[in-house]
Every structure is written in C-alpha cells, then in structure tokens.
Image (tube, rainbow, N blue to C red):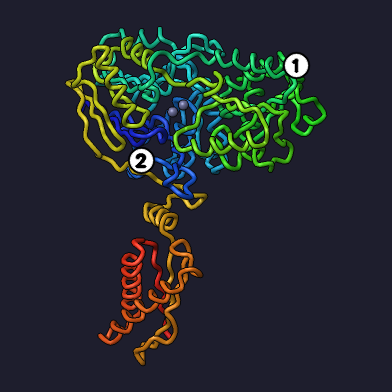
Amino acid sequence: MDQSVRIVFLGGLGEIGRNCCCIEVDGRILLIDCGIMFPDADMPGVDLVLPDFTYLRENADRVDAILLTHAHEDHAGGIAFLLRDVSVPVYGSALSLALARNRIEEAGMLDRTELIPVVDGERRRIGPVDCQFIPVTHSVPEGFAIAFFTPVGTIIHSGDFKLDLTPVDGRHTNLAMLGDIASREGGIRLLMSDSTNAERPGFTPSESTVGAAMRSLFREYPDKRFIVTSFASHLHRVQQVAHAAIANGRKLAFVGRSMQQNITMARERGFIDIPAHAVIDIEETPKLAPGEVCIVCTGSQGEPMSALSLMAAHEHKHVKISPDDVVVISAHAIPGNESNVSRVIDSLHRAGAEVVHDRTSPVHVSGHASQEELKFLLTLLEPEWFVPVHGEYRHLVHHAQLARDVGIAENRVIICEDGDVITLTTDGAYGERRAVPAGYMYVDGIVGDIGHGVLRDRRVLSEEGVVVVILTVDTQAGRVLTGPEIVTRGWVYAPEAEDLIEDAKQAVSTAIEGAIAEGALDLDTLRRHARRSLGRFIDERTKRRPIVIPVVMEV
Ligand SMILES: [Zn+2]
Ligand SMILES: [Zn+2]
C-alpha cells in the first residue's frame, strides 16, 4: 500500500489571507480552512480574492470535509463560494460554525451543508483520518490547532494562535495536550505553524491588557461619548470594552450589521456576557449624556460603507461625530486596508473627535504568536519536518530561521508557496513546486471570478485612460464616409488638446485610406488598422498606452 500523505497548499503561503490547504490520506482530501484575501490598491473594483478552486473542483469526489481552525474571513470567508462546487460537511468549534453559518446561509448553501461541531480536545475520525482538535488562543474565541494521525505519523497544523497565559475566557492554548501528542511514539512528523508575527521579537501581550487600557481611557474621559470599533468576531475584545464601559456607568449600543448579528448570537448562546440592562438601542443614545454612552461599531478596517466610515463622513443616521467624542480604533489594519483606515482617522480628527488607536495607546494586541512563542511551540513539538505557513514570503523565511535557531536541521525546514505540494512518507518529506493551480481568483460583486484580463484592463484604464475612435466606411465604394471621431477619457483633456486630437484623426485617416487602397475592406482588418495606427500615434506623441477602442461601422 502506498504509505504517503500529500499536503497541497492552495493559499496563505506568500500572502496574508486565502488560507487553504489539503491533507490527502489514502486518496481522500480533508481541507483545512478556506479563506479569502482582501484586495489591495492595484486590484481596482475587486471585492475579495479567493483561492483557485480548480484542484478541488477537479477532485470534488475525493473531498471528504472542510475543517475550520477558526472563523476569521481569511480562514472561513471562502467556504460559501467553494460549497457551490464541492458539497461537503464543515467541522469546527460551535462558535466558528455559528460565525460561518451566516455567510453560508446568505449564499443559499445552508440546506445542503452539514455543519458538525467539535469540542475542545475532541478526537474523531473524519474520512480516513483521526483528527484531534486542540484549543488555542487567538483574536476570536474557540480557535483550534488540529492534529492528524496519519499512516505516516502525526501532522499538526497550528491554526492562528498565540500563547495567551491570561486569556479573557480562561481557555488556554492547551500546551499539555500538544506536549502529550508530541511525546507519543513517532513524535510529530510534520508541523505547519502560523508565521504572521515571525518578525516580531518577544511575546505578544495578553488580550487582557486591552481591558486595562480601556478602563483607564474611560476614567480619563468621563464626560465624553465613546465610540469603539473592532472586528465583529473579536468577542473577547467586545467583552472587555463592555465590562469596562459598564463599570464606568455607561450603556452600550451596537452598530453595524455584522456587529449586531454577532453580538446578538454570542449573547444568546453564552459566548459573551453583557447584561440586558446595559444594552440600549442606538436611537436612545441622544437621550443620555455623552459620558453615559459607549457605542461599539464596525469599521475598524476603514471599510467605506461601514458604520465608522459613515459616522466620520457625517452620513450616519444616528451618530454625528463631534468634539464630545472619543473614538477608539481597537484593531490593526490588515495589509491592503491601511490607506482606508488612515483616511477615516483623518476625517474623525477633522470632526473634532479625540482618536485613540494602537499607535497612541495599548488598545489593541495581536492575536498571533511572536518569535518567543513560535520558538516555544517548535521546541515543545520538536517536529521532524517543519513548514511555516500563514504569511507573506518574508514571514515564512523568518519563521524558518526561528526553527533553525531552536535546533531543527536546515534540510528539515521547507519553505513552500501557494501551489506547492509536500509528500510525506515513512522515509521523509519532499516538496514539488507549483504542482497545482493556485493563482488569485478575483471576485467583484456577484460576477464571480473576473479574471486577469478584466483586472489588467481596469489597471490600464485607471493609469492610462481610454481612447475611442469612431468611423463609418462604405466598403462597396472603398472609402471613409464619416470620421474618424475621437473620444477620450483619462488620456488627454480633449478641449485643451485640439491639435493633438486633430493629428490623431489624421493618423487614423491615413492608415485606413492606405489599407483600403491595398484592398482591405472587411471590418475586422480596418478595426485593426485603426487601433494600431492610433496606438502608435499616441505612444509616439505622448508616451502613453491607453486602451484604444476602434469602432468601425459599415453603411
Ligand atoms: Zn485568525
Ligand atoms: Zn489568519
């Protein structure tokens, strides 16, 4: 029997986001996470970026399940898209499933998707593999590392984690359980571990430190209204803000769809403890003095239509920012969102608010392990092979260095990228580069994947503009009847460039007349001549390469 396990990386290695990898045992596939990535400035009009699902689609009958380490968008945001093509059960903690559920429901996939909750420490067979779900601390409650007991030994995926020794809910990263698994016969054959903070020295502070920072802020500004924004899934953050606010005599109002949805669900199901008497509707807040109110809202990433952005732009129905406000941004901008966040902070200042964020005050801590914690995990597990995951390339390189620092042999550390495949056998592990498709899939609205062509056009449009040339020809008589007319946006400002436009028309006329004289009478050929002559003219005279659209019509 072929005793080997394949690990296929579909995303998350070389970028922050799109975390998605397959573990293949006996030809069956378990998917660990299925996340999205947020677009950056050179992806105009793109809403989100998915992993390439080609490999999963082509092997859909071999996929047994999706295992969620936790419910962040970069781990669970792609599930609803994948389920259209690959219908499989989803395993995760009760909270992870509750958070993922909304999106699966919105995509209309809930009826045909089984959501199977697992509890801390649970070991169960999924497909052909025994899997164990190990509690870890992170910036969303109920995260897991996952151990896979395969025919070639134990593989561990850390999920996103930190070693928070004073977690808000008392649920620690279960080091004893990890150590126990590692000390069994055969040890850990292969570890995949979170590299996000591999460049950061020391230890990541405990989430509890944010509670202390919030309490002192409330004391510092007793008469001002507080508006606190954070990720809607960061229930421990919201919990601490709520406790600090209540202790300082404030009522809480939750604003923004995902914040309201998550907090309602979390209160109902006991994931968070906020007494009913402390919660008011946003419409009631004007009846209270500013010092009696704490609004908790969405928008920590500067998302243009989020509650905080609307407030900052004076467009929110119930909340107008004024000098009576302290706005606390209790989050850190995800790569790609920095400029949006900075714009919102600017608008808040312009409206006169006091703005507190992680560079001015300890109102945010990371959910990811720093160097000493990463080394701790590597030392505890002593894996035979190590693959750093979850990070940009430089994070992976730094994490690999940490592994060597704690004594893992250089040739046992494999830096992989999206599309790479690792095969683990009883003898060892080896990697194949770019073995499966793993490019970016761009999603715009409900259009689905818009492809690289569309994106390239958008980039050219945004940087170089568009020039349209219109003419009608009489192919029978072999002559130009009207035009060429030239319309442009973003190339030159036409009213101030009349001479240039006239010269451009002349260049097209000459080319078309020349082509007709040589017998070219079909419209495709004439269009090609129009595009080429105009493109060349524009390049020569202005050194630009806008999109040129020839419209040649026949009479
Ligand atoms: Zn996460
Ligand atoms: Zn993550």
Amino acid type for the residue under numbered disc 1: Gly
State the SS at label 1: loop
Near mark 1 (Cα within 10 A), the count class, few <14, some 14-19 or many ≥20, is some
Q: How many marks?
A: 2
Q: Is residue 84 above or below residue 267?
A: below
- The residue beneath circle 2 is 56
For the residue pair 534 and 334, the one nearer the viewer reads as: 534
Q: Is residue 214 above or below residue 285?
A: above
Amino acid type for the residue under numbered disc 2: Leu
Residue at position x 49%, y 68% in the image:
496
The Cα atoms of the two marked residues, 1 and 2, are separated by: 53 Å
For the residue pair 274 and 375, the one nearer the viewer reads as: 375
For the residue pair 122 and 439, the one nearer the viewer reads as: 439
Residue farthest to the right, as pictured: 287
- Which quarter of the image is occupied by the C terminus? bottom left
- The residue beneath circle 1 is 249
State the SS at label 2: helix
Near mark 2 (Cα within 10 A), the count class, few <14, some 14-19 or many ≥20, is some
Within 8 Å of ligand 2, the CB of disc 2? no
Q: Position of residue 229 (x, y in %)?
A: 61, 29
Residue at position x 41%, y 53% in the image:
459
For the residue pair 398 and 191, the one nearer the viewer reads as: 398
Earlier-in-chain disc, 1 versus 2 = 2
- Which quarter of the image is occupied by the N terminus? top left
Residue at position x 55%, y 13% in the image:
209
* Residue 182 shows in the view: yes
The part of the image, by quadrant, that contains residue 380 is: top left
Q: Position of residue 115 (x, y in %)?
A: 51, 30
Position of residue 255 in the picture relative to residue 363 (left or right): right
